[in-house]
Image (spheres, rainbow, N blue to C red):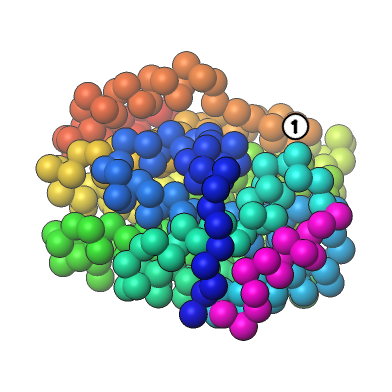
Amino acid sequence: MLTQSPVRSFDPITMVRLVSRTFALSIEPLPALLRDTTTVAYLMFRVADFLEDNTVMVPQRKVELLNLWINMLGGEAGPEALAEHLADIDPGDPEAAVAKQASKVLAYLQRLPPELQEFIIAEARESAAGMARWQARGPVVVDEDDLDDYMFEVAGRVGHLLTHIFAYYFRPIKELKEELLPLACEFGLALQTVNIIRGLNKDYERGWIYVPQSFCTEVGLNPPDLFKPENLEVAMKVVNTLADKAERHLHNGLAYVQKIPRRYHRLRVATMWPLFFAVRTLAVSRSNQRVLVGEAKITRDDVKSIMSDTWRMGWSNHWLESYYERLRAL
């Protein structure tokens, strides 16, 4: 059983806004109980995200700390153990701050019903174990199956977790859970594939290339060759192969949203915002060489328009299909 910790001066919603404004936007329309549960669950995953994704630790230390986090979640290490091992990490980084305050995240988790705690902890442990496995094996993605394995651990499991949470609070979602879970995994893979495309250059600078070697071999390149100026034109063929993959996953993400009963409009909106942000991001990234030398982003006006349009019209599944096509074509 997890040991109780003080939660004063720690506000989960504020912390989520600091580490992911996009996710914060998506959960803010949710009913209070569902929003609070989703917030805490998300922060549980962000602890592992920092340990896996930071640029200040060597892989061996990342593996050790991910395993420590797994032990904390299982009650085999004290709630302050991670903070003690992160004393040398700059707390000014919001991502680091979440990990350094993991004990407070766990304290908030204890406020949830035991059933919710159980599957949140289970998925968080499995995800952290998957991240540790990938850190131990190194930054080599052989083929698409390899990429999907990595993305499932960091994003597909999030889709599963959120679906379990939705099903806990809404009986009709519970009745649809078995249909929704595979689509939830696809939804997670969709968002992660778009993130990989958007962050190609940044990941390369920190020593990781998530593009499968098999994708590069098809155009006669090795993964590091994608970032050489003389290869930009050929490299974009690889980027567009990734974009095609993202679109296949995004279509399943759309199907996930459409299966949520229309009377749960706030829940539908919370799922369609990240979907359509990703669709628009993919549209501005496709055939855009900037993704290999910088980063392609959607504008604030894009975000505002998507939020406004879907709030008004997102109850219609037919409209969602046409809006999806409109965003991807812009």
Q: Quadrant of residue 132?
A: bottom right
Q: Amino acid at mark 1?
A: Gly
Q: Residue 195: percent from the left, percent from the top?
A: 59, 45
Is residue 25 visible to us here? yes
The range drawn in magenta is: 75-88
Is residue 51 magenta-colored?
no
In front of the other: 79 or 232: 79
Q: Secondary structure at mark 1?
A: loop
Q: Residue 127: percent from the left, percent from the top?
A: 56, 69
Is residue 86 magenta-colored?
yes
Question: Which residue is farthest top?
Answer: 301
Location of mark 1 (residue): 294
Q: Residue 47: percent from the left, percent from the top?
A: 62, 58
Image position of 287 (left or right of 292): left
Image position of 107 (left or right of 61): left
In front of the other: 182 or 49: 49
Which residue corresponds to the image point at 54% horizontal and 73% vertical from the top-left?
Answer: 3
Which residue corresponds to the image point at 21% horizontal and 27% vertical from the top-left?
Answer: 313
Which residue corresponds to the image point at 44% horizontal and 49% vertical from the top-left?
Answer: 39
Placement of 241 over or under 61, stated as above or below:
above
